[in-house]
Amino acid sequence: MTGERASMSIHTVFATASIETLLSGLESGQWRALDLVETSLARIEALDRQGPRLRALAHVFAEQARAAAMASDERRRTGQPPGLLEGIPVLVKDNMDVAGWPTTAGARALVGLTADGDATMTRRLRQAGAVIVGKSAMHELAAGITGASSLTGFARNPHALNRSPGGSSSGAAVAVAAGYVPLAIGSDTAGSVRIPSAFNNLYALRASRGALPLDGILPLSPTQDMPGPITRYAGDLERAFAVLSQKPYADTRGRADVSIGVLDAWFADRNETAHDLSAIAYRAVERLEALGARQASVDCPDLRDAVDQANVIAYEFADALAADLATRPTSPVDSLKSLIEKDLHHEQMAAVLRSRADHAGMGSPEYRQALACQRALHERIEAVMTERQLDVLCYPTTRHPPASLGAVQDGINTLLAPVTGMPAINLPIGLDRQGLPVGLELLARSGHEATLLAIARAWDEAGPAWSLPAALRTE
């Protein structure tokens, strides 16, 4: 196939293709890695810089991506064993280091900060043959979920441009949903890969505490921070986690013969839109039953209060950020307070940044108490799952649909995994009456990511096929 015909072919399928499909085309010679990168860059230009201006990208490095793609094509041409992501265009979040590139974390105050080396997550992507096209936009400093950024403005949800894409990995999810790339790596401290994935009809995995390294990622809360993949397909999520964790990739078929504990109290608030979302979530549980799962209602009294008491973000943010910035000679600021003094942050960030700067830190007795609450809550949830013989707990990822762009987002259910250190996954389970995506979160025992990935594969294999947001299907 000529380069022109290959390019035309990949333009037709790229935006909705799985990584497996793209790899198959590369292996057969139907297209080249360079064709994939050019198609990715063309979609970014058409949808991010022009058209709906989705604002999903913080930085694009086209020439570096082209060079990496040509190197991948040469490795394939000379018969070198391909990596799990050989030639696949990907994005990393703007708080992750890529050697020689800016690490601005969505903040104008950090413009000028350049990474000396790759984060381990970045290095593992490269070792697997991935081509890093750029860095995705994010909620400033990862300190929120609306997508507010002084660097890029608000990323826009491709399912409804006037609605929130979620955050803080806003651009990562928007880019995958809009077909810029089949895989983006975000980070999750309180829900930051799972919320935007729920709002963009995608899969996302938050791994168990300690499963993935954090070096080279600008911190929000080292105890709760976790990098994580966002994809359109469950099989791609499994492949990405194998790369990031350096665990064997089996490419097995899905299975859902598991016992699911349904946290009914986390399903709905008392308003019409929440009940619509709740009904969709319950139907998803029924569908999992049809795929082989067994369900049981679970009551954990005062669980939400316990989760809130165990959250350590406010205690860790300022101290952890200062410690990290001290290792970065090109950083224009050295602390959260000096960042605030530059007065370049998004207006929506002013109150939260001041609050975090003045909050008790990691040396306080309150912080030690919150950590004790985390340990107790982890033991409590593991005990409930053991006693009830449950493989996973489930609940809607959010109890409310995406808020208006820039508005406060209520009804978030994603904090349980970060404070317990247990793994969780977002399943895309359909659209509500307004055509907005809905997500279901599954939480497993520590170290049991494979259980979550197997359920996701079963869900995905049962269909329906993934499709672009309606507003983008003519592109």
Image: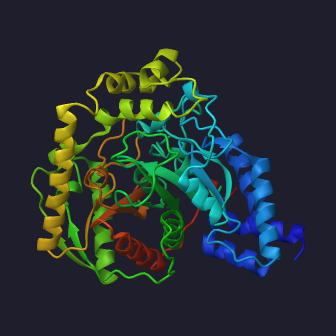
The image quadrant of residue 286 is: bottom left
Residue 94 can be seen in this image: yes
| Residue 93: % across, % down | 55, 47
Classify the position of the C terminus by image quarter. bottom right
Percent coordinates x, y for residue 299 in the rendering: 11, 61
Residue 15 is situated, as x and y percent measured from the top left of the image, at 66, 62
Residue closest to the eye, 182 or 463 = 182
At x 33%, y 48%, the residue is 400
Up the image or down, 247 lies above or below 303; here it is below
Q: Residue at x 39, y 25 (%)?
A: 353
**Coloration of the structure image:** rainbow
Q: Quadrant of residue 71 in the image?
A: bottom right
- 98 lies above or below 66: above
Residue 53 visible in the snapshot: no
At a point 65% along the width and 45% down the height, the residue shown is 99
- Left or right: 285 as drawn, with respect to 264: right
- Quadrant of the drawing holding the N terminus: bottom right
Q: Is residue 141 above or below residue 83?
A: above
Name the one closer to the observer, 333 or 66.
Answer: 333
| Side of 356 relative to 229 (left or right) | left
**Could you say where residue 81 lies in the image, as x and y percent from the top left?**
70, 77
Q: How many marks?
A: 0
